[in-house]
């Protein structure tokens, strides 16, 4: 579904992404993992041409995205931001309906679609559609952001640290909710995060980036069994060490 071929992005002497190649199968969720400055978000934004590459190309369903007008390309790609980016002066329903309004859908069809999407992300249409984003919790706002990304029924979703700013309980609920939605809709997705535990939980495969380069890509089991270098090993050891501490605490309380 998505193929990235020798993709690079330079800003003067700075190489943000360096000769990156990978593919994402239809229905797969690929996590791009790395620290600040690793190139993961730049890569994500080159998929839908929010950033234009210096070299290389991105293919979606066999088409070079460089030959598609950006506004047409983005109609078929859902995008979810970490900070949501809801318009405060618009209602929840109006926020979700932005792309549908631009596509010229008639109002009754838009209302039905908004209600369908709110139910999909586990928000009550009758309660939520007419509220302002400021009336919602952070987790509810992020659910609206996911609904907005799904509005035009895309087959591809791009998610840029969508749950990173949320508390652990809300984050866990939204991770599980998104995984259910993704499987239900058979979405192909690229999911950016800096959190290895999150990557292991949500990803079919994980691509680890550092200094603009792809260091290793594979299933969570592949990475756990055979980390490519010390950097990957350290990333993996962090959630494992935390799990061991929790296990030790549980043993102490049961003794």
Image (spheres, rainbow, N blue to C red):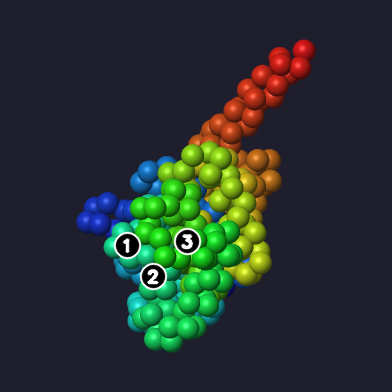
- At a point 73% along the width and 18% down the height, the residue shown is 251
Indicate the quadrant containing the N terminus: top left, top right, bottom left or bottom right. Answer: bottom right
Front residue (pair 130, 9): 130
Dot 3: what SS? helix
Question: CB of mark 2 within 8 Å of CB of mark 1?
Answer: yes
Q: Is residue 228 above or below residue 150?
A: above
Q: Position of residue 111 (x, y in %)?
A: 48, 77
- Within 10 Å of the Cα at label 3, are there few (<14), some (14-19), or many (20+) other Cα atoms? some
Q: Distance of mark 2 from mark 1, alpha carbons?
A: 9 Å
Q: Position of residue 97 (x, y in %)?
A: 42, 73
- Within 10 Å of the Cα at label 2, are there few (<14), some (14-19), or many (20+) other Cα atoms? many
Q: Nearer the viewer, mark 3 or mark 2?
A: 3
Q: Distance of mark 3 from mark 1, alpha carbons?
A: 15 Å
Seen as rendered, the residue at the extreme left is 12
Which circle's residue, 3 or 1, is located before the other in the chain? 1
Question: CB of mark 3 within 8 Å of CB of mark 2?
Answer: no
Provide the residue designation for mark 1: 87
- At a point 66% along the width and 67% down the height, the residue shown is 184
Which circle's residue, 3 or 2, is located before the other in the chain? 2
Seen as rendered, the residue at the extreme front is 126
Q: Position of residue 228 (x, y in %)?
A: 58, 42
Q: Position of residue 117 (x, y in %)?
A: 54, 68
Dot 2: what SS? helix
Provide the residue designation for mark 3: 128
- Within 10 Å of the Cα at label 1, are there few (<14), some (14-19), or many (20+) other Cα atoms? few
Q: Distance of mark 3 from mark 2, alpha carbons?
A: 11 Å
Provide the residue designation for mark 2: 94
Indicate the quadrant containing the C terminus: top left, top right, bottom left or bottom right. Answer: top right
């Amino acid at each position: 579904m998505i193929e990235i071929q020798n993709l690079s992005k330079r800003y003067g002497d700075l190489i943000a992404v360096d000769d990156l190649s990978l593919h994402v199968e239809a229905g797969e969720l690929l996590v791009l993992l790395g620290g600040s400055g690793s190139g993961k978000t730049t890569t994500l934004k080159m998929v839908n041409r929010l950033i234009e590459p210096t070299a290389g190309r991105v293919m979606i369903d066999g088409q070079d995205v460089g030959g598609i007008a950006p506004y047409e390309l983005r109609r078929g790609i859902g995008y979810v931001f970490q900070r949501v980016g809801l318009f405060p002066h618009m209602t929840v329903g109006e926020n979700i309906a932005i792309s549908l309004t631009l596509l010229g859908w008639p109002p009754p069809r838009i209302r039905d679609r908004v209600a369908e999407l709110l139910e999909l992300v586990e928000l009550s249409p009758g309660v939520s559609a007419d509220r302002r984003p400021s009336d919602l919790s952070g987790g509810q706002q992020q659910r609206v952001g996911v609904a907005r990304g799904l509005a035009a029924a895309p087959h591809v979703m791009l998610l840029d640290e969508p749950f990173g700013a949320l508390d652990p309980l809300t984050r866990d609920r939204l991770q599980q909710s998104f995984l259910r939605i993704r499987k239900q809709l058979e979405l192909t997705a690229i999911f950016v995060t800096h959190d290895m535990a999150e990557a292991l939980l949500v990803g079919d495969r994980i691509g680890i980036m550092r200094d603009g380069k792809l260091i290793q890509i594979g299933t969570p089991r592949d990475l756990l069994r055979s980390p490519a270098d010390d950097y990957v090993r350290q990333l993996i050891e962090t959630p494992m060490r935390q799990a061991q501490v929790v296990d030790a605490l549980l043993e102490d309380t049961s003794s």
